[in-house]
């Protein structure tokens, strides 16, 4: 059996950390072995970065990384100071895709959609840009749910954009509806929405309230005439 590779533990004198050979180590323990051959190397200055590089090169225990694990490793390298250009060249990732790929680490649902091919990189970027713009986690969750339910094998960026715009419009309509309700407006039932009917207020407006509403969109210029902002013309006062 090939020896495993270890380096000195940073705080426990006489102990070592495994750089590579975790599966061989576990197999030895299961076999009841108390010793295993090791190749001791010098601990690198940045051990975490070295382990991340190892994971991206050979996987974890020689198993291919899942999309989320790969994203976490790339984000880890960025956190450790690796440049996008270096990551791009070392791991054959287009430079413009390095950060979007790393961001999948914080969005498991989007990572799952990317892993299954439901969204391509361009669509993924559209969703991430929307996340930055919207700042509404519930709305973003609705977008991801609708994309996941789509009957299309792959949802392209144009369709994703349409979904986002529909969700944003619906969210804004709800805000407007709540604002009007707070002011006492009565919403027309769905069955009467296109019937030409109007909802009625609970009480009739007084004359003073009618005058206030009628003049609320008007202003009086210095000359004394009344300008109707809606009609765009001036009415001179009675002489």
Image: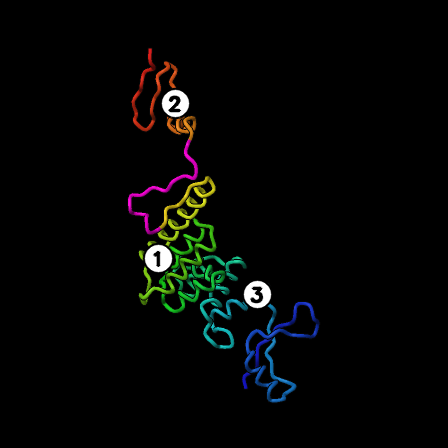
Q: Which residues are magenta?
A: 190-205
Q: How many marks?
A: 3
Q: Position of residue 202 (x, y in %)?
A: 43, 39
Helix, strand or loop for the magenta stretch, by majority = loop
Q: Are marks 3 and 2 in contact (CB under 8 Å)?
A: no
The image position of residue 112, as x and y in percent, is 43, 67
Work out whether residue 3 or residue 17 is closer to the camera in this orientation and state it: 17
Mark earlier in primary sequence (1, 2): 1
Location of residue 91 in the rendering, given as x and y in whole percent from the top left corner: 43, 66
Return the residue nearer the eye: 180 or 160. 180
Q: Quadrant of residue 124?
A: bottom left
Say which residue label 3 marks: 48
Position of residue 121 measured from the top left corner of the image (x, y, whole percent): 37, 61
Number of residues whose C-alpha sits closer than 10 Å to that of mark 3, classed few (under 14), some (14–19) or many (20 or more): few
Element under disc 2: strand
Q: Residue furthest top?
A: 239
Q: Which residue is mark 2?
A: 219
Circle on res. 160? 1
Residue projecting furthest to the front: 203
Residue that appears at 44% across and 50% down: 134
Q: Is residue 4 above or below residue 227?
A: below
Asked where in the image residue 187 lies, by quadrant, the reply is: top left
The C terminus lies in quadrant: top left
């Amino acid at each position: 059996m090939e020896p495993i590779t270890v380096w000195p533990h940073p705080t426990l004198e006489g102990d070592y950390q495994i750089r590579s050979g975790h599966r061989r180590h576990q197999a030895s323990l299961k076999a009841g072995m108390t010793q295993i051959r090791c190749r001791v190397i010098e601990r690198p200055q940045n051990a975490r970065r070295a382990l991340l590089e190892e994971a991206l090169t050979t996987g974890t225990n020689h198993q291919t990384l899942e999309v989320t694990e790969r994203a976490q490793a790339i984000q880890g390298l960025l956190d450790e100071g690796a440049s996008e250009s270096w990551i791009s060249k070392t791991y054959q990732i287009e430079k413009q895709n390095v950060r979007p790929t790393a961001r999948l680490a914080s969005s498991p649902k989007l990572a799952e959609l990317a892993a299954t091919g439901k969204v391509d990189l361009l669509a993924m970027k559209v969703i991430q840009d929307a996340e930055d713009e919207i700042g509404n986690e519930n709305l973003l969750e609705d977008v991801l749910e609708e994309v996941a339910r789509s009957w299309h094998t792959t949802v392209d960026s144009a369709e994703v954009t349409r979904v986002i715009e529909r969700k944003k419009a619906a969210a804004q309509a709800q805000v407007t509806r709540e604002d009007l309700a707070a002011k006492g407006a009565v919403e027309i039932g769905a069955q009467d929405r296109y019937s030409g009917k109007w909802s009625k207020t609970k009480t009739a407006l007084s004359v003073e309230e009618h005058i206030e509403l009628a003049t609320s969109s008007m202003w009086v210029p210095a000359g004394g005439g009344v300008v109707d902002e809606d009609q765009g013309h001036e009415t001179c006062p009675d002489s």
